Image (spheres, rainbow, N blue to C red):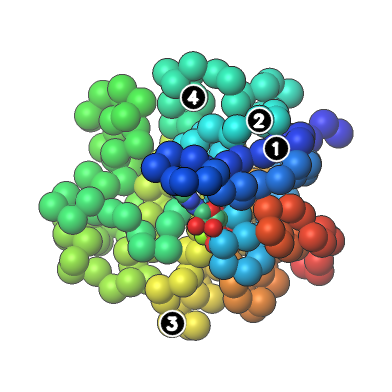
């Protein structure tokens, strides 16, 4: 089986407005397969978010290659990157990142509007996802009128509305209490098990990482350990 994502000899350094470049990823090589649920751990500053941003085409590596479905993607034009990002990747963040002045429904529609889907069609798709996750009753509320757990579930709907192949989640339970965190993790786990979505999730909590099928530990910009874990 070919990997869904293949990262080879990846280097990333930040140099903008810095006296000396900061080397963050150092010769990182990694393969991720369809349907895997990868938990990514490592000390703060080890490069986890940087790696996630590269995988999701939010930023470009300094050197090295990233292939997605056997196609080298790190050198695509920004338009092609945006297209691929909008159609194949869903993002979930620690701070939920919902637009404050827009309703739940509008927030979930947003990735489709970015992909130039018509409003009516986008609204229908968003309603469908909200319904399937039992959140339809929140459609007209503003994010500020939701609990943290509800906001993160809306963010999951927003990630799902494009029917992504991959979900990239950066400490998605970092702002949630442990009961709510467990609910969110169960939703994510079900997504891999029922829909075959590949998940790459950054966390610093062992209990959260344990929901994954594979655990990768990073340190100083390289993979330190990489193991298949239970479940
Ligand atoms: N835009 C940036 N400019 C300069 N340095 C950055 C930038 N983004 C991240 N870094 C640095 O890169 C290192 C790794 O950051 P990050 O990937 O966010 O780590 P992690 O998510 O593992 O905590 C840190 O030392 C951080 O300060
Ligand atoms: Mg981070």
The tag earlier along the polypeptide, 4 or 1, is 1
Other residues around mark 4 within 10 Å, as few (<14) / some (14–19) / many (≥20): some
Q: Which residue is mark 3?
A: 177
**Could you tell me residue 159's position as x and y percent?**
44, 46
* Mark 3 or mark 1, whichever is nearer to me: 1
In the image as oriented, which residue stretches furthest toward the bottom? Answer: 178
Residue, disc 2: 63
Cβ–Cβ below 8 Å for labels 2 and 1? yes
**Mark 2 to mark 3 CA distance (whole Å):** 39 Å
How far apart in space, not on screen, are marks 2 and 1 (Cα)? 6 Å
* SS class, disc 3: loop
Mark 1 and mark 3 in contact (Cβ < 8 Å)? no
- Mark closest to the chain's N terminus, 4 or 2: 2
Q: Nearer the viewer, residue 158 or 220?
A: 220
Q: Alpha carbon of mark 4 to alpha carbon of mark 1: how far?
A: 18 Å
The structure residue drawn at horizontal position 49% and vertical position 16%, both measured from the top left corner, is: 77
């Amino acid at each position: 089986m070919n990997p869904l994502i293949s990262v080879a000899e990846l280097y990333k350094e930040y140099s903008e407005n810095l006296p000396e470049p900061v080397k963050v990823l150092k010769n990182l090589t990694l393969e991720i397969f369809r349907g895997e649920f990868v938990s990514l751990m490592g000390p703060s500053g080890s490069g986890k978010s940087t790696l996630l941003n590269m995988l999701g085409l939010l930023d470009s590596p300094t050197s090295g290659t990233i292939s997605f479905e056997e196609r080298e993607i790190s050198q695509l034009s920004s338009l092609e990157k945006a297209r691929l990002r909008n159609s194949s990747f869903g993002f979930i963040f620690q701070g939920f990142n919902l637009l404050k002045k827009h309703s739940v429904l509008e927030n979930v529609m947003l990735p489709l509007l970015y992909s130039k889907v018509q409003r009516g069609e986008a609204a229908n798709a968003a309603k469908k996802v909200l319904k399937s996750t039992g959140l339809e009753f929140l459609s007209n509320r503003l994010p500020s009128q939701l609990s943290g757990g509800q906001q993160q579930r809306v963010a999951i709907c927003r990630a799902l509305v494009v029917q992504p192949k991959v979900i990239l989640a950066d400490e998605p339970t970092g702002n949630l209490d442990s009961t709510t965190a467990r609910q969110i993790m169960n939703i994510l786990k079900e997504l891999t098990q029922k829909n075959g979505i590949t998940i790459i999730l950054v966390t610093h909590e062992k209990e959260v990482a344990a929901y994954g099928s594979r655990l990768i530990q990073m340190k100083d910009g390289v993979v330190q350990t990489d193991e298949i874990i239970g479940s």
